[in-house]
Image (tube, helix red, strand yellow):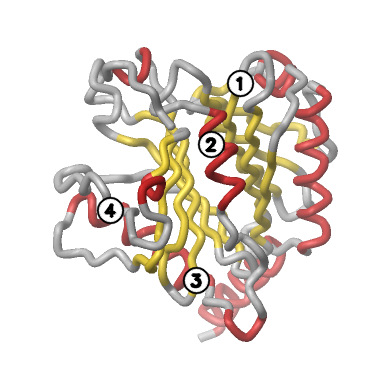
Amino acid sequence: MLPTILLSSLSLASVALSHCSRSFLKQASDAYVAAQAAGTPTLPRLADNFTYIENDKPLDIKTGVLATALKFNSNRSIHDTVQCATFTELIAADNPHPYVIHTRIVFNHAERITLVDSVVTDGDDWAFNATGYVYWNSIETSWDPIAAGARDSRAVVQAAGDAYFDRWNNVSVVIPMAVPCARLEGGAYTGRGNLTANTCDIGGFPSTIKVTNRRYVVDEEMGVVSIFMGFPGLDRTYPERPMPDSHMFRVEKGLIRYIHTVSACQSYHCGMPQQDWE
């Protein structure tokens, strides 16, 4: 019995050590946004052995997009106090080189950054239209913190996002979608023709794609889960290679209200004909 008790105690201690305060994480996400705005390729509290990744490729932080000053139209961050992690969406539509960037930052028990992981998208990528992205983002009204008594549990918020991807490989999975529900994908908006309907399922879903390597940032206060993953089959030129992808889900009362997605391609527009994404 003693070894079991000891192991349980160590496990609980490990979980406790992984927690961070919301105020600390907000300071960290603010510091990241400021660094990207200034083009300063460093961040406070970097661990000695931290990893910097863009589009699933490890890079020297000094050679990545963080070294380029960007003018933002909008930024949004969520904060995961359980996993000690942040997620930030940056929209730079008016920059000379437009970008939409999704970044997650992970801290260790000493509140040092161990990972900066970004999906960086621009005009070469899937459905990219930064002007459309900033416009449709601006008309979405339901991104405020959720009142304490109305918040879903962490498990419920994450489960909604997982159901979305589970459906891609199992047609019997029911995705919990609200009415209305809209998906902002690179710059294309499913709700453009009807803002009061559930349009998140426009175009249907795959049925044979298994989404693995999911990495989560969950913020119950905001009702948001960010999921980084590899998107198999997205790039038609390299169908066997999962493409770097980020989906952010806003969940209210267990139902998906908004989805924001960015996907990086290896070939121009993932091998699809150029379209006027808006």
**Residue beneath disc 4:** 201
Alpha-carbon distance for marks 3 and 4?
A: 17 Å
Q: Secondary structure at mark 4?
A: loop
Q: Secondary structure at mark 2?
A: helix
Q: Secondary structure at mark 3?
A: strand
Residue beneath the point at 56% across and 54% down: 140
**Residue beneath disc 2:** 133
Whether tag 3 and tag 4 are in contact, CB under 8 A, the answer is: no
Q: Earlier in the sequence, mark 1 or mark 2?
A: 1
Q: Is residue 119 left or right of residue 73?
A: left
Q: Residues within 10 Å of mark 2 (few under 14, many from 20)?
A: many
Whether tag 3 and tag 1 are in contact, CB under 8 A, the answer is: no
Residue beneath the point at 55% across and 29% down: 130
Q: Earlier in the sequence, mark 1 or mark 4?
A: 1
For the C terminus, the quadrant is top left
At label 3, the amino acid type is Glu
Q: Residues within 10 Å of mark 3 (few under 14, many from 20)?
A: many
Q: Earlier in the sequence, mark 3 or mark 4?
A: 4
Can you tell which quarter of the image residue 102 is in? Answer: top right
Alpha-carbon distance for marks 1 and 4?
A: 28 Å
